[in-house]
């Protein structure tokens, strides 16, 4: 097979845009997600490209389910060149003393444990081949902490740290690791955080030309196409109007 990329959380936002970008450039695509109907939509969307697509329907939070589904892939699909650990989310926006603990569990289980589970399955395949590239989707919230962000910020800080640790652990195996830390990006992110409140989600991006999912896909594709001896280990991406979590020059509308 030609080059293969695996993308977790590929049913929306960054993951969906990444799948489309790499399919358009001739990669064979493994897309994963917990919502089968969304995976079917992505297959239809990518059908215009001359590429092979494999869908894996599982929840990254469920370790044994992830192991069973990924290990059961046809052998030809296990020669994965690029892994994008994209599955992640923010849920709720509350002070630590009155937050919903179920929201905390969901973020920790997806953003940290889910990323680790998938990496633990795929990294040995890359080690055996002596090459590969892992992208972890973090956030500027991993280093720029804000009020009510508590556990979400903590999970993205963990992704930053894990990215550095992976880079050190895997360097002798010729495997690149890139931590991608986006700022304000208008996807389903805020809609999920505010549990379907469309007006509140829309207000987050009011007066800002926010990043798009396509912007992140372009950056990841660029990093993946650099010469074999070049690795971008950490990359922060923000809209021009954003200099930090709390420093945003909004237009008056």
Image (cartoon, helix red, strand yellow):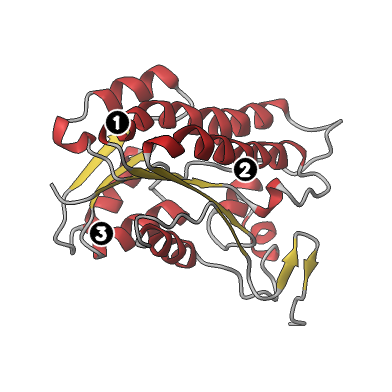
Residue occupying the point 28% across, 30% down: 128
For mark 3, does the 10 Å Cα neighbourhood hold few (<14), some (14 to 19), or many (20 or more) residues?
many
Direction right: furthest residue: 97
Q: CA distance from mark 1 to mark 3?
A: 22 Å
Please tell me whether mark 1 or mark 3 is closer to you in this view. 1
Q: Is residue 120 left or right of residue 19?
A: right
The residue singled out by tag 2 in the image is 160
State the SS at label 3.
Answer: helix
Residue 76 point in image, percent of width and height = 14, 36
Residue occupying the point 42% across, 36% down: 172
Residue 68 point in image, percent of width and height = 30, 20
Q: Is residue 14 above or below residue 1?
A: below
Residue occupying the point 26% across, 35% down: 129
Residue 75 point in image, percent of width and height = 15, 30
In the image, which disc is placed on residue 212?
A: none
Residue occupying the point 75% across, 76% down: 250
Q: Earlier in the sequence, mark 3 or mark 2?
A: 3
Q: Is residue 56 above or below residue 6?
A: above
State the SS at label 1.
Answer: helix
Please tell me whether mark 3 or mark 2 is closer to you in this view. 2
The residue singled out by tag 3 in the image is 23
Q: CA distance from mark 2 to mark 1?
A: 23 Å
The residue singled out by tag 1 in the image is 125
Q: Earlier in the sequence, mark 2 or mark 1?
A: 1
State the SS at label 2.
Answer: helix
Q: CA distance from mark 3 to mark 2?
A: 27 Å
């Amino acid at each position: 097979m030609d080059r293969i990329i695996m993308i977790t959380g590929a049913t929306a936002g960054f993951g969906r845009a990444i799948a489309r970008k790499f399919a358009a450039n001739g990669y064979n695509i493994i897309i994963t997600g917990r919502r089968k109907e969304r995976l079917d939509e992505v297959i239809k969307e990518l059908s215009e490209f001359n590429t092979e697509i494999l869908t894996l329907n599982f929840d990254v939070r469920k370790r044994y389910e992830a192991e069973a589904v990924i290990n059961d892939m046809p052998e030809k699909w296990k020669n994965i060149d690029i892994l994008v650990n994209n599955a992640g989310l923010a849920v709720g926006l509350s002070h630590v003393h009155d937050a919903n603990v179920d929201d905390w569990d969901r973020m920790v289980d997806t953003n940290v444990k889910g990323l680790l589970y998938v990496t633990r399955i795929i990294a040995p395949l890359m080690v055996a081949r002596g090459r590969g590239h892992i992208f972890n989707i973090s956030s500027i919230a991993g280093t720029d902490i804000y009020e009510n962000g508590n556990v979400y910020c903590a999970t993205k800080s963990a992704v930053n740290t894990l990215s550095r640790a992976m880079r050190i652990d895997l360097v002798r195996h010729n495997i690149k690791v890139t931590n991608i830390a986006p700022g304000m990006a208008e996807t389903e992110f805020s809609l999920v955080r505010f549990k379907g409140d469309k007006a509140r989600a829309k207000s987050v991006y009011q007066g800002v030309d926010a990043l798009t999912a396509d912007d992140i896909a372009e950056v990841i594709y660029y990093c993946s196409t650099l010469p074999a001896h070049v690795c971008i280990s950490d990359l922060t991406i923000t809209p021009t109007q954003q200099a930090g979590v709390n420093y945003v020059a909004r237009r008056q509308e």
